[in-house]
Amino acid sequence: MISDAVQSTDGATGAPSLALTPANVRSLDLQFDKLSTEQVLAWAWERFGARAAIGTSFQGAGLVMMHLAKQAGTSFPVFTLDTGLLFPETLELKKRLEDFYGFKIESLEPDLSVEEQADVNGPELWNREPDLCCTMRKVMPLRDKLSTLDCWITGLRRQQSDTRAGIGIIELYAFDETSGRDIVKLNPMANWSRDKVWEYIRTHKIPYNPLHDLGYRSIGCQPCTRRTGNGEDERAGRWIGFNKVECGIHTFLPKKVDFQI
Ligand code: SF4
């Protein structure tokens, strides 16, 4: 049985609270390290129901996560960030996955179209200020979505890059420091290797982005994604020419618990 170890209480009523404290999260992370991904997902479904959602950009782990979530008997909503600058192959993959899994995947879009952004900020902002472009096209739509959730489920893996090597299976972030509202981030596949992900995809014949077969290992927006060599980090093909390895969606919120791996 999974235990929160430290039961939190609602400040106003004294009743048990669904909110997790940093102590809860440390305790749960230790327990989750010994559990299967399906067991971690089942815990999230039992605790949060549809207030937890899977966010995916259709990298390998996200594809596997949707499959495992179904296997675990859960029905998490699934969303993706459609920046308006994705590869046609990625948009096509979304439709193939909806057919394969039999559920809709919500597309979160920025306030401004690519053309409107060019009018306001000049053409091809990604070539000049990729941080601002990512903030407008990814971070802000995600923030809006997270304001409706208690738990955000991601396909992050520790092996993907140095910036992800220290992630927990469960993490806690301050979502709104004024109101004190936190959000749980679940990375149930943190321990998975790339080889294990792709073995699972092949075994279960899950649709995947054909660009992977052309040397793209991490696929984001078309202007900011290149092929990578075998000796490079999986994410080395993103934002070539800039000192940037993360779009910001995994770094814009303050983390409340740090894990040392
Ligand atoms: S990945 Fe590139 S094109 Fe996409 S939002 Fe970020 S800077 Fe803009």
Image (cartoon, helix red, strand yellow):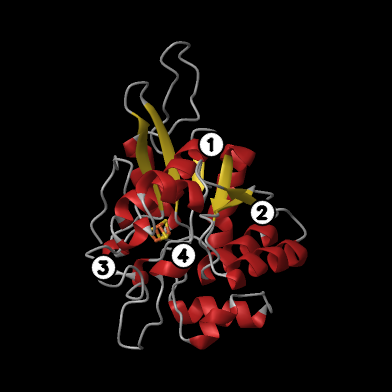
**Marks 1 and 2, how far apart in space?**
16 Å
Q: Label 2 belongs to which residue?
A: 105
Q: Is mark 4 within 8 Å of ligand 1?
A: yes
Tell me where residue 65 appears, x and y as whole percent. Answer: 58, 62
Residue at the extreme top: 12
In the displayed structure image, the side of residue 91 where residue 194 appears, left or right: left
**Marks 4 and 3, how far apart in space?**
21 Å
Q: Look at the picture and state if 191 lies above or below 142.
A: below
Label 1, residues with CA under 10 Å away: few <14, some 14-19, many ≥20 = some
Which comes sooner in the sequence, label 2 or label 3?
A: 2
- Residue contact at pointers 2 and 3, CB within 8 angstroms: no
Tell me where residue 83 appears, x and y as whole percent. Answer: 51, 55
Q: Nearer the viewer, mark 4 or mark 3?
A: 4
**Marks 4 and 1, how far apart in space?**
25 Å
Q: Residue at x 72, y 61 (%)?
A: 98
Tell me where residue 257 appears, x and y as whole percent. Answer: 28, 43
For mark 2, give the secondary structure.
loop
- Residue contact at pointers 4 and 3, CB within 8 angstroms: no
| Quadrant, the C terminus | bottom left
Q: Is mark 1 within 8 Å of ligand 1?
A: no
Within the image, what quadrant is residue 207 found in?
bottom right
Q: Nearer the viewer, mark 4 or mark 2?
A: 4
For mark 4, give the secondary structure.
loop
Label 4, residues with CA under 10 Å away: few <14, some 14-19, many ≥20 = some
Q: Amino acid at mark 4?
A: Cys
**Marks 2 and 3, how far apart in space?**
30 Å
Q: Label 4 belongs to which residue?
A: 221
**Marks 3 and 1, how far apart in space?**
28 Å
Q: Label 3 belongs to which residue?
A: 162
Q: Label 1 belongs to which residue?
A: 149
